[in-house]
Image: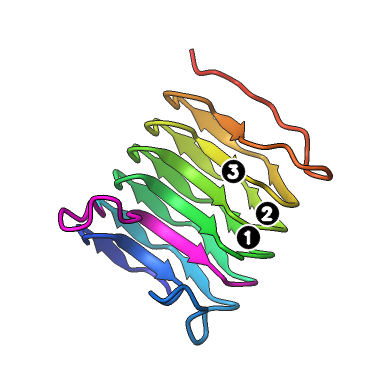
Amino acid sequence: MFGNRSYQNLRIGIRNISSTGLPAAGADGTVIENNHVFENGPDPMVPAAVTGGILVGASTDVTVRNNRSERNNRFGIRLQNGAVDNLVEKNEVFQNSEDGILLLNNADLNTVQLNVVRRNGRDGIRIFDPGRFSVSHLLLIQTFAVLLRMIRDLPGSIEYLREHAA
């Protein structure tokens, strides 16, 4: 998936998973690169629906690289529910209503590196119920809440740095 503009959709700009929660055909090994994803969500018919920029779930060996994800409802980039051994790098993620980059629910062995994450409504990078992962070489600027937050530190996960924006 290369060079697309995805905007003003009711829920997700780019979803690398089927709507049933099962891996979509060909979801493993997908490259999501050089896309501009913006102003997606919220869905007025389903206020509690997951909405945002780029969603990767139940997929392995996915690369999310050189994308711009901005001004989305909730998140810019989200890995969840069995997203394992994926790479998120060199993205610009900013001004999303909640988190810039979110790793959630069994997102394991993922690498997040060389991203610019700034001015998001909650956390720059939020790691909730983490497995094993690597977060390195980040540029975090003017995030309103916590720049990097690990919600629950599990045995074997990396140490984390909690910084507050000025």
Q: Give 126 or 49, whichever is nearer the viewer.
A: 49
Q: Which residues are magenta?
A: 40-60
Q: Position of residue 55 (x, y in %)?
A: 44, 61
Q: Position of residue 15 (x, y in %)?
A: 40, 68
Crowding at label 1, few (<14), some or many (≥20) Cα neighbours within 10 Å? Answer: some
Contact between marks 2 and 3 (CB within 8 A): the answer is no
Q: Of the two numbered discs 1 and 3 on the same chain, state the one appearing first in sequence.
A: 1
Marker disc for residue 128: 3
Contact between marks 2 and 1 (CB within 8 A): the answer is yes
Q: Position of residue 41 (x, y in %)?
A: 24, 53
- Circle 2: element type: strand
Pick the quarter of the image with the N terminus: bottom left
- Circle 1: element type: strand
Three-letter amino acid code of the residue under disc 2:
Thr
C-alpha gap between disc 2 and disc 1: 5 Å
Q: Give 147 or 43, whichever is nearer the viewer.
A: 43
Q: Which residue is mark 1?
A: 87
Residue occupying the point 46% across, 52% down? 77
C-alpha gap between disc 2 and disc 3: 15 Å
151, above or below 39, in the image: above
Three-letter amino acid code of the residue under disc 1:
Leu
In this rendering, position of residue 20 left or right of residue 44: right
Q: Residue furthest top?
A: 166
